[in-house]
Image (spheres, rainbow, N blue to C red):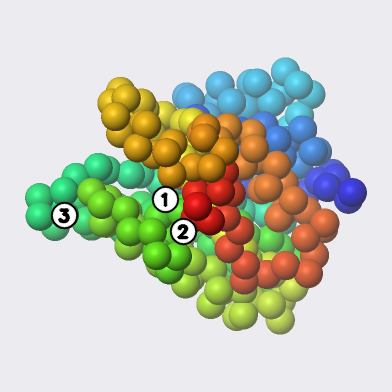
Amino acid sequence: MSSDLKEKVAIITGARRGMGKSHALRLAKAGAKVVVSDISEEECQKVVDEIKKNRGEAMAVKCDVTKKGEVENMVKQAIGKWGRIDILVNNAGICQFKPFLEITEEEWDRTININLKGYFLCAQAAAKEMVKQKSGVIVNIASVAMGQQGVGMPNIVHYCASKGGIVGMTEALAVELAPFNIRVNAISPGAIETPMVDLLKTDPKTMEGVLARVPLHRMGKPEEVSNLVLFLVSDDSSYMTGSTVVIDGGWLAG
Ligand code: NAD
């Protein structure tokens, strides 16, 4: 295994909690210098403190991914401190449960802005540095709600639209950035235990409904997804680009 990330610089968005935090801890453990970014610098700092306690290297940067200026600042800070960007994990996202007929235009725009435009802004800002280096890896976190597999998910139509967009963006970017030795892949997790799905847990019926569709009959842990992120950002996956890897306890196969 060559999943040693020493001397690599990684940016992870939405990393104050949930899967983003887990990815930050995992990549730092593998030796990467990690930019922990999210909407709250204070909470990012707590993740950085945890990484440093484990003798890793990290820095907290406040970044709302919908704001181009903040995204550019995040990249600038990474370059200013460590001189390069090797890895971007586009992870920041929201999921609002609401019947389609009640979703407002503002709610639609908010989901698309964070989940899709945010990935575009971060990928573009990071790729401008990666192109200069002639190397880099981008991992976009999509979802089993990405469509294309015949599993329609009600009450999150705007979320599904954003996640489907991420898969299309990943394939197009992989082709466009390959000449610069930049690989781009996506991960589609199933139901993973994070604050995002707390709402599901409060309703035993909904939870049972989800688990009934998952052959392994449990939710995934953030760390299980982080292992896949580590594989995709490391040289172990050197021949992979443009792929979307599903990690869902068998949900889509069931
Ligand atoms: P989470 O809610 O714990 O984490 C999402 C993070 O994104 C939060 O820290 C939040 O502050 C951050 N964020 C929200 N808006 C932001 C913005 N404008 N700018 C920067 N950061 C912002 O949820 P999670 O489950 O850890 O989600 C991580 C990713 O995984 C998301 O893209 C989500 O859609 C995806 N996902 C989650 C599941 C699941 O079951 N939990 C399944 C499939 C995909």
Q: Residues within 10 Å of mark 1 (few under 14, many from 20)?
A: many
Distance CA(mark 3)–CA(mark 1): 25 Å
Residue annotated with mark 3: 100
Residue occupying image coordinates x 42% and y 38% = 212
Asked if labels 2 and 3 touch by Cβ distance under 8 angstroms, the answer is: no
Quick check: can you spot residue 109? yes
Residue annotated with mark 2: 119
Residue annotated with mark 1: 65
Q: Position of residue 243 (x, y in %)?
A: 62, 67
Is the residue indicated by label 1 positioned so its CB lies within 8 Å of ligand 1?
Answer: yes
Residue occupying image coordinates x 64% and y 21% = 49
Asked if labels 2 and 1 touch by Cβ distance under 8 angstroms, the answer is: yes
Distance CA(mark 3)–CA(mark 2): 24 Å
Q: Residues within 10 Å of mark 3 (few under 14, many from 20)?
A: few
Would you say 216 lies left or right of 155 here?
right
- Residue 202 falls in which quadrant of the image? top left
Residue occupying image coordinates x 71% and y 23% = 52
> Marks 3 and 2: which is nearer the front?
3
